[in-house]
Image: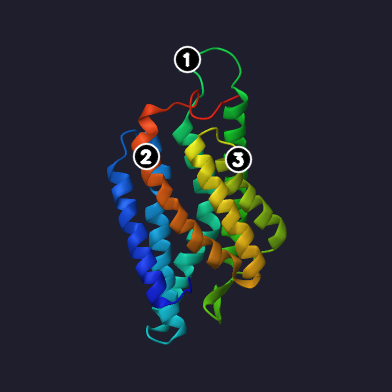
Amino acid sequence: MCWSTEADLVAGSVVAGIGLVCLARVRRARDLPLAALPLLLGVHQLAEAAVWLGTEGRIGAGAALWARTVWVLIALPLLPALVPVAVWCALGPARPPGAEGPPVAGQRRRAGFAVLGVTVSVLLLAAVLAHPVTVGVRGHLLTYGTGVPYAPVLLAGYLLATVGSLLTCGDRQLQLLGVLVGAAAGLCALLWRLAFVSAWCALAALVSVLLLHWVGTAPARSPNTAGGEQ
């Protein structure tokens, strides 16, 4: 797949459309944050289509600035907080409400990933707000400049919060999503190091359509039966 105005427009439209269907199938309020992920990532790809238009001089400078700012705000501050918090919300307590005693290990683990994600998100938001967003073209990919300090450390926390929360959540379907998103991260790191975030977000948008099936089957599952909660 090559990324371009047209490719991002088509991919974004398809994923956003699936995201709307995903939201329409939600039957539990706590599933809404995770069910909204395909729609968000679809909109994200549509924003990148507008960024491409800006690099080609087909829209004004103001519109181009808004497009790349929206793209970066979703990619950097929003996703590392949304994914683990959404997993935490969707799986909920792994014991009956009102039960006595300390939280089970899975519940503590999900809460830990949520705290990590929010922490990384706050640091990335501060960096984005402090520096102008720049964009460059490298072949069929875009590179974004944000002036993020300690980028390798924050990237590690970012991936741990997003991929780790899915891989260890105890729900087999979400774990599969985590495997695919993690594999996409590895592939993008190997092939498109300078445009890692752009490429990874695009692949994550495509695999997020697995949430359409997850939403439809979520009410039939509980954290105690989804995948061997500890």
Say if 75 sits above or below 51 in the image.
above
Structural distance between the alpha carbons of marks 3 and 2: 21 Å
Label 3 close to label 2 by CB (< 8 Å): no
Structural distance between the alpha carbons of marks 1 and 3: 23 Å
| Residue 91 locus on image (x, y percent) | 47, 32
Q: Residue at x 37, y 34 (%)?
A: 217
Q: How many marks?
A: 3
Label 2 close to label 1 by CB (< 8 Å): no
Q: Tag 2's secondary structure?
A: helix
Crowding around mark 1 (Cα neighbors within 10 Å: few <14, some 14 to 19, many 20+) is few
Say if 20 sits above or below 192 in the image.
above
Residue lying farthest to the bottom in this orientation: 57
Mark toward the start of the polypeptide (2 vs 1): 1
Structural distance between the alpha carbons of marks 2 and 1: 26 Å
Residue 37 appears in the rendering? no
Mark toward the start of the polypeptide (1 vs 3): 1
Which residue carries the number 1 mark? 98
Mark toward the start of the polypeptide (3 vs 2): 3
Q: Residue at x 56, y 26 (%)?
A: 228
Which residue carries the number 2 mark? 215
Amino acid type of disc 1?
Gly
Label 1 close to label 3 by CB (< 8 Å): no
In terms of depth relative to the viewer, which is nearer, 98 or 18?
A: 18
Amino acid type of disc 2?
Val
| Residue 100 locus on image (x, y percent) | 55, 12
Crowding around mark 2 (Cα neighbors within 10 Å: few <14, some 14 to 19, many 20+) is many
Q: Residue at x 43, y 58 (%)?
A: 41
Question: What label sits on residue 113 in the rendered view?
Answer: 3
| Residue 34 locus on image (x, y percent) | 43, 43
Amino acid type of disc 3?
Phe
In terms of depth relative to the viewer, which is nearer, 189 or 82?
A: 189
